[in-house]
Structures are given as structure tokens and as C-alpha cells.
Image (spheres, rainbow, N blue to C red):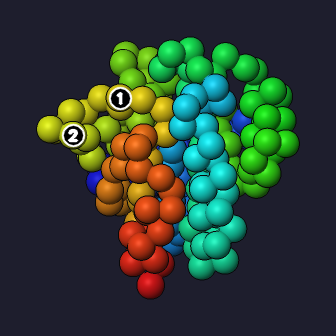
Amino acid sequence: MNTIDSFNLRSLSGEELKLADFKGKVLLIVNTASRCGFTPQYEGLERLHRTYRERGLVVIACPCNQFGKQEPADAEEIGSFCQSRYGVSFLLSEKLEVKGPGAHPLFHYLSEALPGLLGSRSIKWNFTKFLIDRAGRPIRRYGSLVEPGKIAADIETLLD
């Protein structure tokens, strides 16, 4: 398998999100948490979403509680926090695991397709970002320290 088309997620409200439905779009998939030092990156993710959505960018945040238990909230609290604090209007998945034996299959696939630093397959922390091209192929992985705005040029390239 070399595309994400066969994977599905559930939205924060429980609706099925078939990634095949986003074929022809550029996706930015990010594992997130509401109580993390990187949580302010929601603002930059929202800026990317608003800037590029008309050209075909889809941002999907996937809340995860595996790193320092920094996402302990339930779906309603997560949604409310993201909307009230950062004005998030992009897609939020249900809370899921991104590493280890309980990792969601999408994150297992992305970690294998795009290893991190020194070839590490494991996701190290919240706000790891995966950029997917219009054909559904994983293109680039960005660590937590990479601010969303620093990804804009790569997004532009895939949208052209």
C-alpha cells in the first residue's frame, strides 16, 4: 500500500471520515493535545486551513493522550476547547493512539512510510505533522518543533 485511501477515521462527533473521499486534496494530518507546550500550534494550523482550503488543503487534527497525558478531555471538551480558544474550523478526529500496539492503522502506516529523525518510526511527541499529496501519498513528516507556518512553502508546492 502506498496511499492513505484505504484508511478511515472517526470525527470528534463520531462520523466516519473516509480518507479516500479526500483524493485530489492535499492533507496535513497532525496528532494533537490540548494541554501541551505545542498546543498554540492550533493557531498556525487554523491559519494554514483558512489560507489554503479553497485551493485544496484539508487539515485533520487527531487528539492523542499518549504523551504526558496531555489530552485527558472527552470529545465534547476537546471540541469546545479547540473552537473557543483557537477558532478551529478544520477537521478533528476522535481521540486515538498514534504509537505502540494500539496505534490507529493510519498512524502505523504514516510512521512506516515517513520515518522520523535517524530513521525512527515512532512518533516522539504531540504535534507531529504528516503532509500527504493529492494522490494520497505521504510526502513529508515534520516534528513537533516545526511551526505550521514553516510548512506553507511545501503545501504551496503540492497545491500548484
30 sits to left or right of 58: left
Residue placed at 54% from the left, 52% from the top? 19
Identify the element where label 1 is drawn: loop
Viewer-nearest residue: 89 or 10: 89
Ranked by sequence position, the earlier of labels 2 and 1 is: 2
Q: Horizontal and vertical percent for residue 145?
A: 41, 43
Residue 134 against residue 39 in the figure, above or below = below
Instruction: Say which residue label 2 marks.
Output: 117
Q: Horizontal and vertical percent for residue 60?
A: 59, 49
Which quadrant, please, contains the C terminus?
Answer: bottom left
Q: Residue furthest bottom?
A: 160
Residue placed at 21% from the left, 40% from the top? 117
The amino acid marked with disc number 2 is: Leu
Q: Horizontal and vertical percent for residue 65?
A: 56, 20
Instruction: Say which residue label 1 marks.
Output: 124
Residue 23 against residue 11 in the figure, above or below = below
Residue placed at 36% from the left, 49% from the top? 142
Viewer-nearest residue: 126 or 137: 126
Identify the element where label 2 is drawn: helix
Viewer-nearest residue: 41 or 92: 41
Give the crowd class for mark 2: few <14, some 14-19, many >=20 residues within 10 Å. few
